[in-house]
Image (cartoon, grey):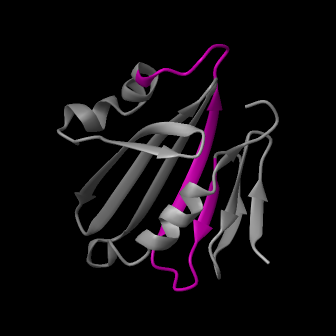
Amino acid sequence: MKNFVSTQTWSASLPDGWTHSADDECITFVGPEDIGALQISSYKKDQLVKDQDLADFAEDHLEAGARPTTVTFGKYTGFRIAFAVDDSFWQQWYLRQDSQMLFVSYNCPIADRTHENREILELLSSLAPQGGA
């Protein structure tokens, strides 16, 4: 049976062996090999979140030359960027659905940058809005 994480505004299913912890800022997911960390933060607006809102949130990375790739996960749409800083590899997804924005971040050692891709995509593909998000 799959394990699920549910918040007031979104839910997702965990890949086999993955665990999660929550704090005031985000929910952190870690795989069984403890290679990297995937974090999801949720934000709400009083109106619809637009593509420009996502671009504004990612402004520093986009101005630094990050190239966004359009993505869709269920009802969420947005873009993904990837970059390296020192010995760390980062992927970030800026997603929107109605008045909700999700900021998803994954980081790991650069040498392991593709190791958990399948599980990350599995988790992101399971994202679903909750509670009128």
Q: Is residue 72 magenta?
A: no
- What span is in magenta? 26-51
Toward the left, the furthest residue is 65
How far across and down, in percent of the image, does residue 70 sit? 35, 40
How far across and down, in percent of the image, does residue 64 sit? 19, 37
How far across and down, in percent of the image, does residue 5 sit? 75, 59
Write the residue at 68% across / 67% down. Answer: 20
Is 45 rendered above or below residue 42? above
The image quadrant where one finds the N terminus is bottom right
Left or right relative to 100: residue 132 = right
Left or right relative to 49: residue 46 = right
The image quadrant where one finds the C terminus is top right
Is 78 rendered above or below residue 90? above
Write the residue at 56% across / 56% down. Answer: 125
Left or right relative to 73: residue 46 = right
Write the residue at 37% across / 27% down. Answer: 55
Q: Is residue 47 magenta?
A: yes
Q: Nearer the viewer, residue 81 or 122?
A: 122
Q: Nearer the viewer, residue 72 or 19?
A: 72
